Structure formats: structure tokens, C-alpha cells
Image (spheres, rainbow, N blue to C red):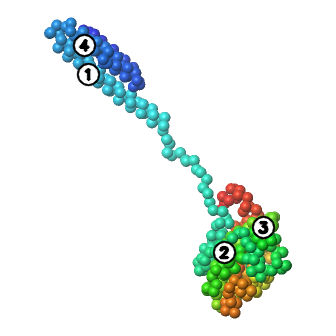
Amino acid sequence: MQGKLKNILSEAQQELSQIDNLEELNDIRVRFLGKKGQLTGVLRGMGTLSAGERPVIGRLANDVRSQIEDILERRTAEIKEKHKIVQLESERIDVTLPGTSFMMGRRHPLSIVQEEIEEIFLGMGYAIEEGPEIETDFYNFEALNLPKDHPARDMQDSFYINPEVLLRTQTSPVQVRTMERTAPGLPVRIIAPGRVYRRDDDATHSPMFNQVEGLVVDRRVTLADLKGTLQVFVEKMFGPATKTRFRTSFFPFTEPSAEVDISCVMCGGQGCRVCSHSGWLEILGCGMVHPRVLEVSGYNPEEVTGFAFGMGIERITMLKYGIDDLRLLFENDLRFLAQF
Ligand code: DAH
């Protein structure tokens, strides 16, 4: 019996030294120490032993059991450790590898420039107004001193929805809408950015484009205020060295009217292809608000005066960034947009 017990121990030692996973280890536990296991088998035969042998064999059996248990425990720990190392190795992450970068969105150049224009005028005390893109003939034309048969309507070929409703061709109707709401309150000092629509489509015209309208109404507002304001705007937008020039012009809703040129941003006024060798670039239209426009909108032209201006955001953007084709602004080509 003693021999049997020693065999059991050495067999268990032998088997346990060869395995490398926990399932096999458990098999061995069952086979040697389980209820129907080898050691239990030996102990069952104890009854046949003499009283003197029994405690000796009993002690030896317990000793074998605890030795096997020790080995089981050690091997369990070893196998677990080994698995952990294998797992760590296979799931290893190299934190120094460069990550997969993803594309970041950014603002469209037109949005950048619109916000810049807004910031400049907000800084001068202006409020921002909005108006509808689907507009009535009254606000888009009539109230701005452009009656139905007026030839100046030809300059703005329009998308009509019906004879009285159209897509606005300019942001100027926001002047009238604002004054109607605020009259006779003073001062009025607003800009109105937004989309406008005209039936044009080529390298320099898009059927949809953006404008910013400006309007100031108060007592004793003069042409000098208009010039000073736009001068400040131009210097902030294009740099302090930029020169400004006012040329007389015509708009039905202003009297007198002017167009503003700036010294060419490409050549500084020397003359180049961009400014058609004139040294100047036209950037906006402006003037003193026509008395009839003040009147329709609820202000008394005997008491108040005002100035107004309107500029195309696309044009300002193209000049500011040296973009030579308007269509680039609408094609959504990331190679272009990623440059801003
Ligand atoms: N609405 C004009 C246009 O689209 C631009 C303009 C000119 C606006 C003179 C004004 C202004 O407010 O006073 O061509």
C-alpha cells in the first residue's frame, strides 16, 4: 500500500509537470483526488490493514494528498501567469505609433468673411438684422423707389414665384422692414447679411450669392458719416494701408449715390491684371437714403437722414484671399476649402 501511495504521488508529479492548461489540470485533480480518484481508492482499502499499519498509512496518504494539492496550486498559478503573459503579448499596444487622424471640419471662407464683417460693424455699435429670402415685390423693389416699370429693375434679373412674390435680389428690403418696425425710434443702426438670388450664372456671377446691407438713420446723419464709416471698415477688412475712393453712381433708393473702390489688394494701386490696370477695385454701393424710402418706412425725411450701403460677400472674399473664380466658393472641393 505504501508503494501504491508513492506511485500515485510520482505519477501525479509526472503528469502535472507536463500539462499547460487548466482543463487538463482539473482532470488530473479529479483522477487523483476526486471521490472516485486513485487516492480515495487506496484509502478505501484501509480496512484490511492492521491497527498498527493504519495510522502510518493514514499519515502517508494525507501527506501524498497535501503534496499533490501543493503541486496543483503551484501549477495553477504558473499556468495562469503564463496565459497572462501570452495574452499581454498578443494584445500589446504600441502607444508611440502615430494615430489614425480624421478630417476636421472647418468654416467656409464665406462664413469666415461674413463673421469678420459682422465683427467690424458690431464693434461700431450696429445690430444684426435678418429678412426673408422669399420677398414681396413691394419690399424688394417698390418701397425702395423702384416702381414696376422702372428701368433700374433690369439690373437685377429676378426669379419670380408669382407677379408679386420673388426670391429677393438684394438685402436692401431689410432696410424697409427694419425701419417699419422701429419707426419713429432713433437711431437705426443695422447690418443685414444674407442670401440673394439673380438670374445670372458665369465665372463672376452665381444665381445665389450673399450680401451685407448696412443702414443708419438718425438726426443729422451726413455723407461724411458714411465716408468715415466705410473708410474704417475698409481699413479693418483689408489693412490700414488700403485707400478708399468714392465715385458717384446711381441707385434708386439713395440720393446721392456712390460706389466705393479700394486700392488694389494685389498690386497696391500700381495696376495689374486683377484691377484691369486701374489700380482700383470696386467693392460696394452706397448713398444717402432717398427721402421717399424714409417716408414709406415711417420716418419723416424733414427730421431724419440716413445712409445705406450694400456689398457682396463673395466679392470681398475673393479679393481678400486672391480667389480668381467665383465658382470655387460653391463647388465644395475639399482641396480648395482646406486652405482656409
Ligand atoms: N442693393 C444694391 C445691389 O444689390 C447694393 C446697394 C447699393 C445697397 C447702394 C445699398 C446702397 O444699401 O445704398 O446692387
Outermost left residue: 52
- Split into 4 quadrants, where in the image is the C terminus? bottom right
Q: Position of residue 299 (x, y in %)?
A: 67, 87
Q: Mark 4: which amino acid?
A: Leu
Mark 4 lies on a secondary structure that is helix
Distance between the Cα atoms at labels 3 and 4? 104 Å
Mark closer to the observer (4, 1): 4
Residue 126 seen: yes
Q: Position of residue 67 (x, y in %)?
A: 27, 21
Figure quadrant, ligand 1: bottom right
Distance between the Cα atoms at labels 2 and 3? 23 Å
Looking at the rendering, which quadrant does residue 142 occupy? Answer: bottom right
Mark 2 or mark 1: which comes first in sequence? Answer: 1
Looking at the rendering, which quadrant does residue 46 occupy? Answer: top left
Mark 2 lies on a secondary structure that is strand
Mark 2 near ligand 1 (CB under 8 Å)? no
Asked whether the beta carbons under mark 2 and mark 1 sit within 8 Å of each other, the answer is no
Q: Mark 2: which amino acid?
A: Ala
Instruction: Say which residue appears at 48% left-offset and 38% top-offset.
Output: 92
Mark 4 Cα shell of 10 Å, populated few (<14), some (14-19), many (≥20): some
Report the residue marked by disc 2.
Answer: 192
Instruction: Say which residue appears at 63% left-offset and 71% top-offset.
Output: 116
Report the residue marked by disc 1.
Answer: 66
Distance between the Cα atoms at labels 4 and 1? 14 Å
Report the residue marked by disc 4.
Answer: 43
Mark 2 or mark 4: which comes first in sequence? Answer: 4
In the picture provided, is 90 more to the left or to the right than 186? left
Q: Nearer the viewer, residue 301 or 189?
A: 301
Mark closer to the observer (2, 3): 3
Instruction: Say which residue appears at 32% left-offset and 15% top-offset.
Output: 36
